[in-house]
Image: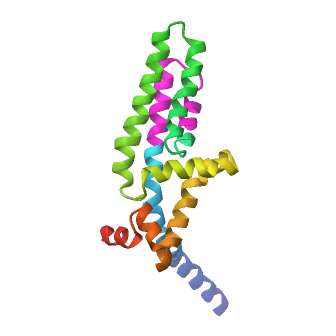
Amino acid sequence: MAVVLITAALAQARAVFEPLVLALFIIAIVWPLQHWLQRRIPPLLALAVTIMLVGAFAWIAGLPFPVEWGVIAFVLNYIPFVGPFLATVFPTLLAMTQFHSWQAVLGVFLCLNVIQFVIGSYVEPRVSGNVLTISPLLVVFATFLWTYPWGLFGTFIGVPITLAILTFCDQHPSSRWLADLFGQPLRQRSASRR
């Protein structure tokens, strides 16, 4: 009889405390990731807007595979400076085979460039804030430098590798001048976020 009462009490306690334990478990997982998520989600949202706008324009213009063009623009936007241009060239080349007038092809090219310009110059900086505070010249240099030895893979990871090197340089007094030269020092960035 006591075993039945204890089992019933444990089942009732489990029903009461299970949602609380689950909530505490989720908080314990998400809380350390909060800072990481706050920095990563806004740029992804801006790039998701790219997928929607490029896909919607490709669908309105009558290009085949509009969703795929949006995803391709999303992926190519990770390549600084060159990627957004390539994201407009490929659909334009397809438009050359689809449309019979050069005016329509030019319209596709210009509209896609306007979308990329608005997202890259207005939406993404407003959403992302000052997450990446290095010289634009260094971004271009890093992209081409790491593309040379590693090809396309180096194009995607060139800027993160350069940021890691600058972070390392900022931590050591003998190389801090390098971080100060090529980007805003981490000490100033952390002070400006407060």
Residue 80 location in percent, x, y?
51, 45
The residue shown at (53%, 81%) is 13
Where residue 64 sits: x, y (%)? 59, 21
| Residue 20 appears in the figure | no
Q: Nearer the viewer, residue 135 or 1?
A: 135
The span shown in magenta is 48-73
Residue 71 position in % (x across, y down): 56, 37
Say above or below: 149 vs 53. Answer: below
Does residue 66 appear in this view?
Answer: yes
Q: Quadrant of residue 162?
A: bottom right
Quadrant holding the C terminus: bottom left
The image shows residue 187, relative to residue 3, as above or below, that is above
Label the magenta part by its dominant secondary structure.
Answer: helix
Q: Quick check: 90 left or right of 48?
A: right
Along the horizontal axis of the image, is 116 left or right of 29?
left
Residue in the picture at 36% in, 49% down: 125
Residue 120: x, y in percent?
Answer: 41, 41
Q: What residue sits 39% from the left and 30% below the top?
A: 114
Decide whether residue 27 is among the magenta residues. Answer: no
